[in-house]
Amino acid sequence: MRVFRGHSRPVPDPVVLAIGNFDGVHLGHAALVRRLAEIGRIDGLVPTVLSFEPHPREFFAPASAPARLSTLREKLELLAGCGAEQAMICPFNAGFAALSADDFIEQVLVRGCRVSHLVIGDDFRFGHRRTGDFALLEQAGQRFGFAVEAMGSIVLDGQRVSSSAVRQALAAGDMAHAARLLGRPYIMDGQVLHGQKLGRQLGFATANLRIKHNPLPMTGVFAVEVSGLDATPLPGVANLGVRPTVGGTRPLLEVHLFDFDRDIYGAHIAVRFVHKLRDERRFDNFDALKAQIAADAAAARAFFKQ
């Protein structure tokens, strides 16, 4: 995927464009991007997504912003998997937030993105104080020569598929429902780093990933599958959280892979959370922690044998 930072330099070719935060890249986002790819094939346009960094709610109200479902890298990888070939990432700062709806259309969509066809979600609003809407885009399309279409929401079991719904499922530990909303298990990826080697001391060596999601969308102990190391995903058990027993304060993902003993430091892996086993909690001593880790590993193995 080709990635452009900011809209000051125009993309090289006309595009079919979708706009959004795309956090988590759920079923609704995937349908939107597949529609882009379809139009791109028919009209010879580059399927392109326009997104923002940071999330606008992180800019306006950082203390109450929702937990991120995906890092920028994860989001771009998922969007590319749905058919997007190009992305423009606009820094969401005071200047960008102050753009009027008309300026956003002219400066970002027309000049920066060279939009020929625009596909938006049915609830999309834009510009300063969110004054821009579908009607304004239609008027601008007539003036600047681009087509506009809106896609309805995806509804699953009577619930509108949204990033908020995914966050609720993850926070509740309902990994199966989160997977239905996403169209796949929830994933975090990252590079395997050197840690304190505490897992090895306890008899359960772990691959440690420093997590950029802060706050975390969920915490706890999970049955997981890891891709990026072998041809097929490898099963394991993982703790996602701050490790209160050892006085941790920063989010860390620790993954113990079953029947696996290779040096994978530096590898980039993707961790799929398929089932929650329990909440993260503090233990009084390492013996109690070791016993619980053994129980967690046994529970995860049993889950995969079902």
Image: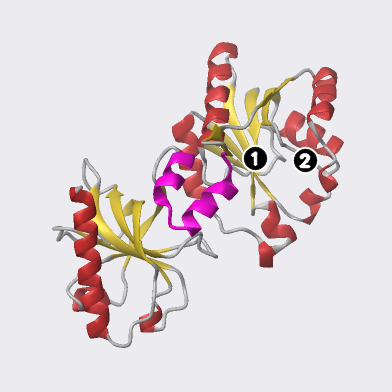
Reply yes or no: does residue 55 show up in magenta. no
Query: Residue tagged by mark 1?
Result: 20
In this rendered view, identify the residue nearer to me: 21 or 108. 21
Give residue 126's mark: 2
Q: Residue furthest bottom?
A: 284
Give residue 208's mark: none
Q: Residue furthest front?
A: 158
Reply yes or no: does residue 177 show up in magenta. yes
Q: Which residues are magenta?
A: 160-181
x, y (%) of residue 218? 47, 61
**Viewer can see residue 169:** yes
- Identify the residue at image location x=19%, y=55%: 302
- Identify the residue at image location x=22%, y=42%: 232
Q: Earlier in the sequence, mark 1 or mark 2?
A: 1
Crowdedness of circle 1 by 10 Å Cα count: few (<14), some, many (20+)?
some
x, y (%) of residue 51? 63, 42
Q: What secondary structure predominates along the stretch shown in magenta?
A: helix
x, y (%) of residue 178? 46, 47
Horizontal side of 162 relative to 253 (left or right) equals right
In this rendered view, identify the residue nearer to me: 75 or 154. 154
Crowdedness of circle 2 by 10 Å Cα count: few (<14), some, many (20+)?
some
- Identify the residue at image location x=64%, y=31%: 18
For numbered disc 1, what is the local secondary structure? Answer: loop
x, y (%) of residue 24? 52, 46
For numbered disc 2, what is the local secondary structure? Answer: loop
Identify which amino acid the numbered label 1 is placed on: Gly
Q: CA distance from mark 1 to mark 2?
A: 10 Å
Identify which amino acid the numbered label 2 is placed on: Phe
